[in-house]
Amino acid sequence: MRILITGGAGFIGSHLCERLLGEGNEVLCLDNFFTGRRENIIHLLDNPRFELLRHDVTEPILLEVDQIYNLACPASPVHYQYNPVKTVKTSVMGAINMLGLAKRVRARILQASTSEVYGDPLVHPQQEEYWGNVNPIGLRSCYDEGKRLAETLMADYHRQNNVDIRIARIFNTYGPRMLEDDGRVVSNFIVQALRGEALTLYGEGQQTRSFCYVEDLLEGLIRLMNTDDQHQPVNLGNPGEFTIKQLAEEVMKIVGADTGFKYLPLPEDDPRQRKPDITRAQQILGWNPTIPLHEGLVKTVEFFRNRQQNALAS
Ligand code: NAD
Ligand code: UDP
């Protein structure tokens, strides 16, 4: 199959490129390199079934493809708040352009949506039927509302034009290739612990998140894409729920550093709790995450340690 991955040079996208190439597909990786890095996909460039396109999804493009994974969008609060108007454009115009392409070439399209569509949830754990509790005008709104509108566009292109859509609501995902200065909690804590610095806890660190290892997520995304007639949103995440302080303690234990905590103010609209109900993914995809937090963190710490050592050596 010929598969387009927008945001293919990013954290999740680069793993997806690798995996789909490994399964024998032709992969077109489209990215504007805002948070994506050439080093994430450099090892794929020699593969004759791999093609790299420097392009911005806010601009239309015509390509012949069978499937589209629409992942283009900065995912970390630091990056999506850097230029919030651009973040909205990326989600909304990106979805319109990719849906237009899907309609024209009759490709199936999967939208990378997010648990952020539930906002600061009043229902716990979050099921797909929950409509969410999102501030429309806050600092996080450019991302949350952008993704909500991308879902709306997917649903309307399906109803109006019969485009074959998939919507994955991805919960916090981590693993190798996250950026050091990404600002997301897993990479922040690992980098701080490896540098011997105190770990930055926002608020009291009592807010919760559920962390999914990237390999598990890929399996869910690929199953969702390749299961027929599933046009409803599907939560993909690991239901193991931890406070941010528990995560910090686990990272320190794995790194072997006891650097303590530095308490900083809780960012505006920071969700207090988050945990996916994955019944739908279990039932329709037969999918379950298999990598517990400890095991995934060990692999991620190893990646960051190697990257740090390579940087010191060069
Ligand atoms: P990332 O920032 O590493 O990847 C995003 C990629 O999109 C980057 O390569 C970036 O350069 C590219 N991009 C951004 N704007 C673009 C534009 N206008 N045109 C073309 N390319 C553009 O983030 P990630 O964690 O790999 O996230 C990938 C997708 O999954 C995003 O859509 C994100 O919203 C979604 N998601 C991720 C998580 C998570 O925990 N990692 C959770 C929920 C949803
Ligand atoms: N967080 C933290 N310290 C950090 C970075 C993040 O305590 O150095 C907290 C943040 O306030 C949030 C949680 O960790 O409650 C997850 O943050 P992240 O940005 O990774 O993801 P999101 O908030 O988008 O789920």
Image: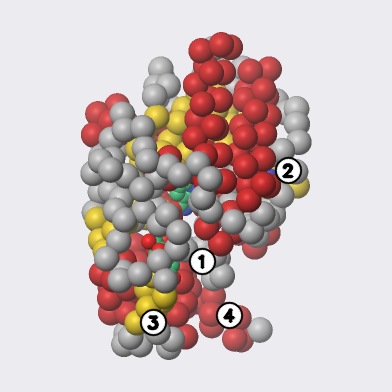
Residue at 54 percent of width and 75 percent of height: 307
Residue at 24 percent of width and 54 percent of height: 240
Q: Report crowding for label 4: few under 14, some 14 to 19, many 20 or more residues within 10 A (C-alpha).
A: few
**Image-quadrant location for residue 53:** top right
Q: Is residue 287 visible?
A: yes
Residue 242 screen position, x and y as percent = 25, 61
- Of labels 4 and 3, the one closer to you: 3
Q: Is mark 2 within 8 Å of ligand 1?
A: yes
Decide which of tag 4 and tag 3 comes sooner along the chain. 3
Residue 237 screen position, x and y as percent = 33, 46
The circle on residue 183 is 1
Kindly identify which residue carries mark 3: 262
* Callout 4 secondary element: helix
Residue at 30 percent of width and 61 percent of height: 207
Which amino acid, mark 1?
Gly
Q: Tell whether label 3 touches label 4 (CB within 8 Å).
A: no
Q: Nearer the viewer, residue 203 or 286?
A: 203
Decide which of tag 1 and tag 2 comes sooner along the chain. 2
- Of labels 1 and 2, the one closer to you: 1
The circle on residue 310 is 4
Kindly identify which residue carries mark 2: 56
Q: Report crowding for label 1: few under 14, some 14 to 19, many 20 or more residues within 10 A (C-alpha).
A: some
The circle on residue 287 is none
Decide which of tag 4 and tag 1 comes sooner along the chain. 1
